[in-house]
Image (cartoon, rainbow, N blue to C red):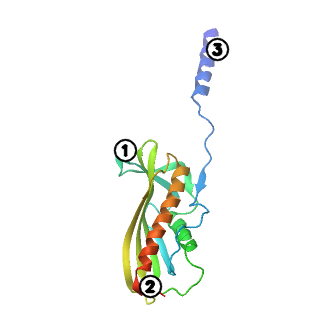
């Protein structure tokens, strides 16, 4: 009998010791409250879309030190809205208050990830495809924008902050590009 009680007590202790802390509550992130550093020339904002899988709220990362082609999602961290909507919000915040834009700008998000070079070192990476059209919808110009923001930390909150900075840099690149288009000047 004593042996049976001792075995049960040991089993209970082993089960308790194997339990981890309480599950972490899911967290939602966006690109922050800071206004974009760049101001865009007047443009009409057309659709901002994403190719799969960046059209959902999962926060993706890549372990480049292991396999850069593998995407994984943080278990308890999500975007507050899909990346195209977060980029659209930043885009709208970077526009001047007045209207009268001769061109429309459409964007497609092709990459929106935190890329780990090692277990504790990462960068935020954004790749966009931009399209400018005139008032009649004819294509004026298109281009790709690729931004890597270093020092993205080793966790989802740090990555979200770095993706906010990378979005800012991408908007600054777009601003210069749009300003250089003669057909888009007011």
Residue 1 visible here: no
Q: For the view shown, which residue lies furthest in the top direction?
A: 2
Q: Quadrant of the N terminus?
A: top right
User: Which x, y percent locates residue 62?
Assistant: 41, 50
Q: Are marks 3 and 1 in contact (CB under 8 Å)?
A: no
Gap in angstroms between the C-alphas marked 3 and 1: 49 Å
Residue designated by label 1: 65
Disc 2 packing (10 Å; few <14; some 14–19; many ≥20): many
Q: Do the residues labelled 2 and 3 touch (CB within 8 Å)?
A: no
SS at circle 1: helix
Instruction: Indicate which disc, 2 or 3, sits on the residue closer to the N terminus.
Output: 3
Disc 1 packing (10 Å; few <14; some 14–19; many ≥20): few
Q: Which of marks 2 and 1 is in front?
A: 2
SS at circle 2: helix
112 sits to left or right of 8 = left
User: Which x, y percent locates residue 138?
Assistant: 39, 86
Q: Which of marks 2 and 3 is in front?
A: 2
Q: Is residue 17 above or below residue 144?
A: above
Instruction: Indicate which disc, 3 or 1, sits on the residue closer to the N terminus.
Output: 3
Q: Which residue is drawn at 51% across and 55% down?
A: 162
Residue designated by label 2: 184
Instruction: Indicate which disc, 2 or 1, sits on the residue closer to the N terminus.
Output: 1
Residue 113 image-quadrant placement: bottom left
Instruction: Return the mark for residue 185.
Output: none
SS at circle 3: helix
């Amino acid at each position: 009998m004593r042996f049976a009680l001792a075995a049960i007590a040991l089993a209970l202790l082993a089960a308790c010791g194997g339990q981890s802390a309480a599950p972490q509550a899911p967290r939602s992130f966006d690109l922050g409250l800071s206004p974009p550093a760049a101001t865009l020339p007047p443009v009409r904002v057309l659709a901002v879309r994403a190719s799969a899988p960046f059209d959902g709220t999962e926060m993706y990362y890549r372990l480049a030190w292991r396999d850069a082609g593998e995407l994984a999602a943080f278990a308890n961290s999500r975007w507050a809205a899909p990346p195209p909507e977060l980029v659209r919000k930043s885009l709208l915040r970077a526009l001047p208050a007045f209207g009268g834009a001769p061109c429309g700008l459409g964007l497609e998000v092709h990459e929106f990830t935190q890329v780990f070079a090692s277990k504790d070192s990462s960068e935020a990476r954004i790749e966009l495809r931009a399209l400018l059209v005139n008032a009649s919808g004819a294509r004026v110009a298109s281009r790709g924008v690729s931004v890597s923001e270093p020092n993205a930390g080793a966790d989802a909150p740090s990555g979200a902050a770095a993706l906010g900075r990378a979005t800012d840099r991408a908007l600054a690149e777009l601003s210069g590009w749009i300003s250089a288009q003669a057909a888009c000047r007011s």
